[in-house]
Amino acid sequence: MLRFSDRYIVQSKIVLKDLLSLKPKAVYKLVPHPIYSGFGDAMGKDAARKQLGITESRVLLFFGYIRRYKGLHILLEAFAAMPQDVPTRLLVVGEFYGGEEEYRAKIDQLGLQDRITLVGRYVPNEEIPAFFSAADAVVLPYLSATERHFPDRVPFRDAARDHRCGRTLGGGGERRARDDRGTGRSPGAHRHA
């Protein structure tokens, strides 16, 4: 594909580096991926949980297209291993791009049917606020990623109270917002909540 193009748009410095390693004389324009902000206002946590029928005291959210590189299979295993002393609900919200039956079978195999809400479909913009507002943490266990995959692009960062931790992948650190609520941890770093 690269050899048939004469101009390129890249969305991070790391992708630019990859492009130039493959095509050193490439003509390119760096256009950072926009921050998603057109999803309306956040809701109160209690109202969002009531709307979604959630009664657990802790809620984790995995949101977006469901593809293997996003690490949902690893999250399911980790969630199954979590102590159950604090009732926790995992919301898995997004359209499957292959492997739906595999994920459903894994949920059954791990005995998670009563602890997971699986919304395996495209979610229209007007429904998004409830999911992020209900969440205590957004969990994005990506196996690999580029700039467009990073948590600083997640809508309702404040509604999700910016509880995020994980390893740094790809170019996401280039514009990651940091404050007293969010973290951008390096590979191998751990955070205990």
Image (tube, rainbow, N blue to C red):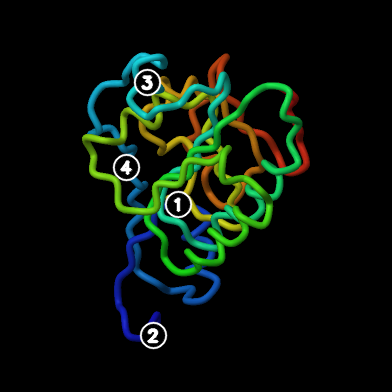
Q: Secondary structure at mark 2?
A: helix
Circle 3 sits on which residue?
Answer: 50
Q: Is residue 161 above or below residue 88?
A: above
Mark 3 or mark 4, earlier in chain: 4
Residue positioned 40% across, 29% down in the render = 132
Quadrant in the picture for the C terminus? top right
Give the spatial CA distance, label 3 vs label 4: 31 Å
Name which residue type carries label 2.
Answer: Arg
> In the rendered picture of this protein, how many numbered marks are placed on residues?
4
Give the spatial CA distance, label 2 vs label 1: 21 Å
Circle 2 sits on which residue?
Answer: 3
Mark 3 or mark 1, earlier in chain: 1
Give the spatial CA distance, label 4 vs label 2: 27 Å
Mark 2 or mark 1, earlier in chain: 2
Residue 109: x percent and y percent?
Answer: 67, 57
Crowding at mark 3 (Cα within 10 Å: few <14, some 14-19, many 20+): few
Mark 2 or mark 3, earlier in chain: 2
> Which mark lies nearer to you, 4 or 2?
4
Crowding at mark 1 (Cα within 10 Å: few <14, some 14-19, many 20+): many
Mark 4 or mark 1, earlier in chain: 1
State yes or no: discs 4 and 1 in contact (Cβ < 8 Å): no
Mark 4 or mark 2, earlier in chain: 2
> Which mark lies nearer to you, 4 or 1?
4
Name which residue type carries label 3.
Answer: Lys
Crowding at mark 4 (Cα within 10 Å: few <14, some 14-19, many 20+): few
> Which mark lies nearer to you, 3 or 1?
3
